[in-house]
Amino acid sequence: MSLHDRLIELREQNNLSQLEVAEALNVSRQAISRWETGRAKPSTEKLIALSRLYGVALDELVGGEPARAESRAENVEAPASPRRPSPRRLLAAAVLVLALLAAIIGAYLLGRGESDGQMVDSGDMEEEVITDIEGIEWIPWGE
């Protein structure tokens, strides 16, 4: 059913004249006549006002059929299209992964050094005073 036919039907079901509808919507009677003959279409604002005046849902006014609960539920549950992450987010994720990797490797190397005995505690060292430089055994570097 077309919009103009629906407008006539709803106005007649509500026992209203074109003039009464025009006054309720603050438009001229001629505007109502043009809408009902299909020579003009009401604005969205006026369609909303008409749906309130006639006590019907907006989609029922323009579509001519009562809205079905299933069709509304299908529209709400429609999956969203997948979005690609922005380059800024990808860069931030890469920096975070690299920082975590560096922390893990650093902790591993520190733990490995202690277990090999490579770390020296100053409490384990004995102090020796050298008075004669000729008594020192010299070892060449790199041997």
Image (spheres, grey):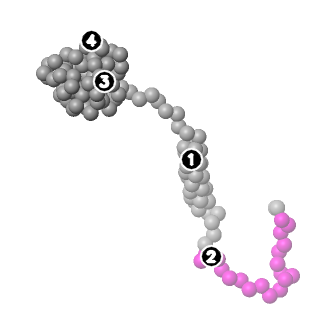
* Identity, as a three-letter code, of the amino acid under mark 2: Ser
The residue beneath circle 2 is 122
Residue at the image position 82 percent from the left and 61 percent from the top:
142
Q: Mark 3 is on which residue type?
A: Ala
Q: Which mark is residue 66?
A: none
Mark closer to the chain start, 2 or 4: 4
Mark-to-mark CA distance, 3 and 1: 59 Å
Q: How crowded is the residue under tag 4: few (<14 C-alpha within 10 Å), some, or many (20+)?
A: few
- From the top left corner, tell me how far across and down residue 82 is, in percent: 47, 30
Magenta-drawn segment: 123-141
Which is nearer the eye, 7 or 69? 7
Type of the residue with mark 4: Met
Write down the residue under mark 4.
Answer: 1
- Upstream in sequence: badge 3 or badge 1: 3
Asked if residue 96 lies in the magenta stretch, the reply is no
Which of the two labelled residues, at mark 1 and mark 4, occupies the earlier sequence position?
4
**Mark 3 = which residue?**
31
- Residue 92 tag number: 1
128 is higher (above) or lower (below) than 49 = below
